[in-house]
Image (tube, rainbow, N blue to C red):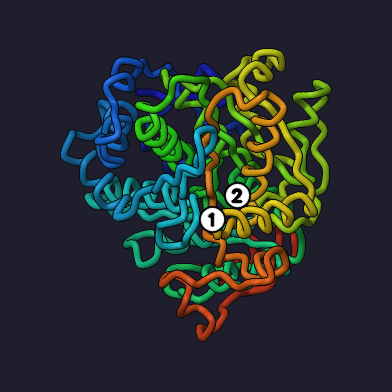
Amino acid sequence: MKFYSTRDPSKRVSFEQALFQGLAPDGGLYIPEEDLQLQTHFKALDKGTSFHEIAALVSAYLLKGEVDGGAVHRIVKNAFPFEPKLVVMDDNLSIVELFHGPSCAFKDFGASFLAAAMEEFLQHSDRKAVILTATSGDTGSAVAQAFYNKKNIQVVILYPSGRVSPLQEKQLTTLGGNVLALEVKGSFDDCQAMVKKAFLDPEMSAAFPLTSANSISLGRLIPQSFYYIWAFAQLKEQLNQEFYFAVPSGNFGNLTAGLYAWKWGLPVTAFIAATNANDVVPQYLDTGIYSPRPSRLTVSNAMDVGNPSNFERMEALFHKNRHLMRALVFGDTVSDPQTLDTMRTVKDRYNMDLCPHTAVGYAAARRFLRDNNSAGHVAVLATAHPAKFLEVVEQATGRTPELPPQLAGLASKEKQSIVISNTPADLFKTLKDVLL
């Protein structure tokens, strides 16, 4: 299977090339050339189909012609010693828990697959890779955990100083080894812009074998489609109505992965794109005007993105036709007070803690069901363990969530980071000082 840039369909590359290039040379994002025809496979799925079976099925199509079946199964086995869990709240709503991996966030799925795939391709080569990635919180910790101690791979993570939760910061700054944390004096959008400019800078590309683990990387985004398919299989037997996903959305990689699953034949009625105050995509869906702006600070900080990269992929999927996009993607905006109230209500009613991002998705899902007279079933993606956001959960509920084992030992670990300005020049100088 081949992949091409959103900005130049004439130049096609293999999955391996897309994996290691990250960003296309023209600044575009890689997308699949073909629409996989998997409808027949999806119809055969049921509650007994394992997550590993689904991951292997889709991976075999994506990697066709590049690796054999044995390599596909090695990648899937190495990538996923964890899997999603489903909690059915009532007839109309369920929660897909995606936080049971090493960093307790949904991004473990994409990061772990990317690490396993890169390791498979590098094992018979003397090549090296420098993973350069920006994070608003969860990406950095997931990438750090997934790539820690991987051979021939150096990880460099840029994160906005003071704009990630304390536990998130500990996750990405305490590993050391092949993981370098750069604390940027700026926003996530600054970090993301620095990464993009680094990929397009000939001097940087010549000095370092750069690749990305952000959702601009096809190898990190596509595996996120696996849990949409898995959730459908788990719920399939009880679905005699329309089926929706509510997706907490910041950089829109998670939603885009679901759109690919739909494109390949997954019978989803529509997606609810749930954002916080950084609502440039819902505003585009309403007005037809896409107007990126500086990100705003909210209690759901991992979604504080004012210029989401994956909007470019979304436009490509719908051929830049807003009406086609609106037919499948409903936008909704959830304020901080609504987020905190949702966290409090769910705790009181179900004795369940939600992270603030999951609460955004949950609030949008309940509003959608109310406005549509409970027509259909909505699966809400739970993107992170609530304990990653202790301060926000305590603020909302007055109680402290229990720390899972992955997070319990972080408090005593020492932060290791280098503070830099929000300029590409400072990034380049730091990388030369540390890595060369």
Instruction: Identify the amino acid type marked 1.
Output: Ala
Percent across and percent down for residue 192 are 66, 50
> At which x and y percent is residue 124?
22, 50
- Residue 358 rendering spot, x and y as whole percentages: 60, 49
The residue lying at 65 percent from left, 34 percent from top is 273
Q: Is residue 378 above or below residue 207?
A: above
Q: Secondary structure at mark 1?
A: loop
Q: Which numbered circle lies on residue 54?
A: none
Please, is residue 377 above or below residue 227 in the view? Answer: above
Left or right? Give the position of 67 relative to 391: left
Q: Nearer the viewer, residue 231 or 146?
A: 231
Instruction: Tell me the crowding category of disc 1: few under 14, some 14 to 19, or many 20 or more residues within 10 angstroms, Cα based.
Output: many
Q: Is residue 393 left or right of residue 403?
A: right
Rendered-image quadrant of the N terminus = top left
**Which residue is the site of mark 2?**
358
Asked which quadrant contains residue 353, the reply is bottom right
Q: Is residue 164 above or below residue 64?
A: below
Labels 2 and 1 touching (C-beta < 8 A): yes
Taking the image as shown, residue 392 lies to the left or right of residue 44, namely right
Give the residue drawn at x 67%, y 70%: 394
Q: Position of residue 57 (x, y in %)?
A: 27, 30
Task: Kindly identify which numbered label has been placed on residue 384.
Answer: 1
Nearer-N-terminus badge (2/1) = 2
Which kind of residue does numbered mark 2 sit on? Thr
Q: Nearer the viewer, residue 132 or 34?
A: 34
